[in-house]
Image (tube, helix red, strand yellow):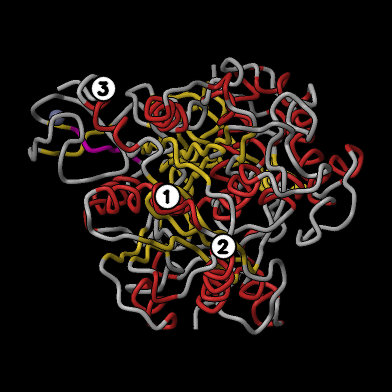
Amino acid sequence: MSDVKQKPVPRPAPESAPYWAAARERRLSLPKCEDCGQNWFPPSRTCPHCLSSRVTFADVSGRGKVYSFVTFHRVYHPAFEGETPYVVALIELEEGPRLLSNVIGLAPEDVRCEMPVEVVFEDVGDATIPKFRPRQA
Amino acid sequence: MNIADFSTDLEAARELRDYCSIVGTATSRLGRVPGVSSLDLLVEAIRNTVEDAGLKASDIDGVICRGPDESYSHHQVVAERLGINARFSTTLTNGGASQILGIAIATMAIRFGLAKTIVCGFGRDTWSRTHATEEARVRNETRPASQRPREFGPEYGYFGATAAHAFGATRHMHLYGTTRDDFGAIATAFREHALRNPDAQMKKPLSMEDYHAGRMIVAPFGMYDCSLRSDAAGAVIVTRSDRAKDMRRPPVLIKGFGTFNNTRGWFNDDNMVVTAAKQSGEAAYRMAGLGPSEVDTAQIYDCFTYMVLTQLEDYGFCKKGEGGAFVSSGALRLGGALPCNTSGGQLSESHAEGMLQIVEGVRQMRHLYAPDRQVKDAEIALISGHGGNQVCHSTLILGKA
Ligand SMILES: [Zn+2]
């Protein structure tokens, strides 16, 4: 039986494997349509903008802003005991797509909507997960 | 194709206005009912509903229900326990939007001759599943394992519906200056209504001080922003309005319904701030031929306080961004401008994914309550259902016959 104190690691669907492989190399890479040029998230094999199946992965800037955020006070998983309060935010990337992550490097009460952030990478077990910190000047 | 062009839909929708009525409604025991499955709670509610209507089970030829998430073909199991065959039966999976959707489908099925008398209902045993035993308390999980996300959430410590809805609350507060006092106005108003309802799960008064003293769960939500975990079921019986006159109770007209699903997702567009209640409500208003100023009482899907505030805006009871001032004015209280969740809602009565909102809407339109619970002179009730990954929505408008 797995240690319940261990943090959950991503168990990727086949279509998101390239995203997590890129994160291992400390790159934020999103699906991109070769026909209409748009990005989206979460990964899928058909472009939700034009239904093209010519889909590739392309690195994005890693810059974005906080669209919204919440602060966990309750422990929902034993691995996060001792980490509360922590912030989970919806990050809107400069390229458009939004993704869930943690905002780290400042107190939860200092996080704001529209705050500029940039990606940092954190190793959790065998996985590397993108997190965000306030954008450095 | 323009999905916002309703000109050709209007005629079809008008044909359904008042075509059917609700002729029976009831609940199961509510709150903490250990040792009774969600299925048996639903069967209990249906039995009480059949009795309320003065019918026999054999008078029913249709069953529409949402099952527990892990149940397969739930309507079949329900009908089997009722001892009936069904000309029309199915199970819906739009979460808390399913219960009104069931009534919408029932009305259409009856209109087109697929069935005559359909029971719609839902039951859940969430309190028992999360609190009744030590094992349940430790697990404290309402969702079956197969439905929990595998990526893009758990690795960030992101779990549960509370956080999902809290995102909307934060964004609304950012855009419009909405405060936790506004959320507290909702929680305290509904608690006051629950104290008038002997069946309600919550029995103690809730002051604004109590609200702010409640422990934080996922900020900006504290414990009193969150709906209850309940063992609860409810049901209604729908039949053609011209058949409804000779029943035991006053029939209640189904004046309109609408659905809209922001299937692009809760995190896309502005969906967490402008919910699908907007288009779902517009569709229901169109069918009913009326607008928000004609609504006398609203029974709003209150999984979290914020969802009441934003849906009231989306329904046009006030402008977008003015929900905080609206709810803090006391409008939602019995005797206020728009008495809302008059039996206590999911925050204080019991949580059956919108089913009890429907039951209360019907009861208000029957005018059988004592004056302390009755919305005076109420002719029109609006009821909302919300769920299905936060973006599925349905609206029901009922009228006094
Ligand atoms: Zn495309």
Q: Which subunit holds the residue at mark 1?
A: B
Whether marks 3 and 2 lie on the same chain? yes
Can you tell which of label 1 and label 3 is closer to the viewer?
3
- Residue B6 badge: 3
- Residue A52 forms part of the magenta stretch: no
Label 2 lies in ligand 1 vicinity (Cβ under 8 Å): no
Residue A62 in the image: state x and y as whole percent: 39, 29
Above or below residue A113? Residue B261 is below
* Lower sequence index among marks 3 and 2: 3
Judged by its main secondary structure, the magenta piece is strand
- Residue B388 badge: 1
Instruction: Please report the bounds of the magenta region as a residue range.
Output: A27-32
Which residue is found at the position 49% from the left and 44% from the top? Answer: B386
Q: Amino acid at mark 3?
A: Phe
Q: Dot 2: within a 10 Å radius of its alpha carbon, few (fewer than 14), some, or many (20 or more) residues?
A: many
Q: On the picture, is B303 further left or further right than A8?
A: right
Ligand 1: which quarter?
top left
Q: Nearer the viewer, residue B318 or B217?
A: B318
Q: Nearer the viewer, residue B306 or A57?
A: B306
Residue located beneath label 2 in the image = B234
Which residue is found at the position 60% from the left and 62% from the top? Answer: B26
Q: Dot 1: within a 10 Å radius of its alpha carbon, few (fewer than 14), some, or many (20 or more) residues?
A: some
Can you tell which of label 1 and label 2 is closer to the viewer?
2
Whether marks 1 and 3 lie on the same chain? yes
Q: Amino acid at mark 2?
A: Gly
Residue B308 in the image: state x and y as whole percent: 62, 35
Residue A44 is at least partly visible in this image: yes
Residue B374 in the image: state x and y as whole percent: 75, 41
Q: Which subunit holds the residue at mark 2?
A: B
